[in-house]
Amino acid sequence: MTEELMTIREMCEAYDVTPRTLRFYEAKELLFPIREGQKRLFTKRDRARLKLILRGKRFGFSLEEIRQLLDLYHAGDQQLTQLTRTYEIACERLADMESRRDELTQAIEDLKEQLKWGEQVIASMKKEKKAAE
Amino acid sequence: MTEELMTIREMCEAYDVTPRTLRFYEAKELLFPIREGQKRLFTKRDRARLKLILRGKRFGFSLEEIRQLLDLYHAGDQQLTQLTRTYEIACERLADMESRRDELTQAIEDLKEQLKWGEQVIASMKKEKKAAE
DNA sequence: CGTCCGACTTACGTTAACGTCAATCTCATG
DNA sequence: CATGAGATTGACGTTAACGTAAGTCGGACG
């Protein structure tokens, strides 16, 4: 288990995605499975990238934005200028994520308040109903 | 300023959206501007809802999900069962948001680590370059 | 050897969330 | 009254992120 290489089927079950999705990500150059004849074989690196892709998606990032982030995580062999640019993009993205988290925290507070209020309303409605019986 | 009612143009400038977007949200029953002849006039309530819509969008919620959340914020005249259901949906959504925030916090940490590493790489590449001159 | 299963490629279909364009309508202004 | 700036209503176009169907191909099995 947890072999070095995984087939498309194994990947699908492990990460709950469809084959189509994996092929799509490959076409978009987000994943780079190696080939054994026709078949794809996904490496550890592909799995790491896929995890990041799925996480990014949960935050509403587009695949293109995610691809830029992935570059940072695998930026070993780049040129200085290119790497610097990638770094800057990532910094912006980081600031983005932080402000997003803060806003999310705020939204959570708001919703909690609203839920408290909702509880009250529901409770009082139940009372009325009882009284009417 | 901050009058009770706002025209579509004022809304667009205030919230940085297009007229098309506002009409679209109305068609989807997310907003309910009143009419003065042909023209739409947006109330304070519409503005509050629009803020929540835009916030929801930033978190990657779909308009349909957002509509359900909005129901909670304006759930004055609903039936008990309907209200209870709305309440439950909102609770789920809340849990959703909280786990999302936690994951986001984690991702921010990861990215920070990666950026630190990136700085090092860039720094060392600059050194090499200097040495080569 | 036939065939059946899973993976592959190609290509067209689909949904959400608007953009864009054309054809009115309306109202203030010269 | 003509006209020009905005607002409105269809209606069709667009992009992202896959879904789905059709046809192919290579290997495993009886």
Image (cartoon, coloured by chain):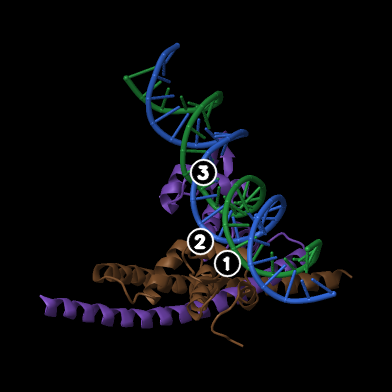
Chain colours: A brown, B purple, C green, D blue
Q: Position of residue D25 (x, y in %)?
A: 64, 61
Measured along the vertical axis of the image, is residue A30 above or below residue B99?
A: above
Determine which quarter of the picture holds residue B82: bottom right
In screen coordinates, is A28 left or right of B81?
left
- Foreground of the two, A84 or B4: A84
Q: CA distance from mark 1 to mark 2?
A: 15 Å
Query: Label 1 amino acid?
Result: Gln
Output the chain of dot 2: A
Q: Please report contact status of discs 2 and 3: CB closer than 8 Å, yes or no.
A: no
Q: CA distance from mark 2 to mark 3?
A: 34 Å
- Foreground of the two, B45 or D12: D12
Determine which quarter of the picture holds residue C5: bottom right
Q: Residues within 10 Å of mark 1 (few under 14, many from 20)?
A: few
Q: Residues within 10 Å of mark 3 (few under 14, many from 20)?
A: few
Measured along the vertical axis of the image, is residue A30 above or below residue B45?
A: below
Instruction: Tell me the residue that label 1 is attached to.
Output: A38
Q: Position of residue C9 (x, y in %)?
A: 57, 57
Instruction: Tell me the residue that label 3 is attached to.
Output: B20
Which quadrant, please, contains the C terminus of chain A? bottom right
Query: Label 3 amino acid?
Result: Arg
Name the element at disc 1.
Answer: loop
Query: Label 2 amino acid?
Result: Ala
In screen coordinates, is A1 left or right of D4?
right
- Foreground of the two, C11 or B45: C11
Name the element at disc 2.
Answer: helix
Output the chain of dot 3: B
In screen coordinates, is A107 left or right of B91?
left
The structure residue drawn at horizontal position 17% and vertical position 80%, both measured from the top left corner, is B127
User: Which mark, by number, is residue A27?
Assistant: 2
Which quadrant, please, contains the N terminus of chain A? bottom right
Q: Position of residue D5 (x, y in %)?
A: 38, 31
Measured along the vertical axis of the image, is residue B131 above or below residue B85?
A: below
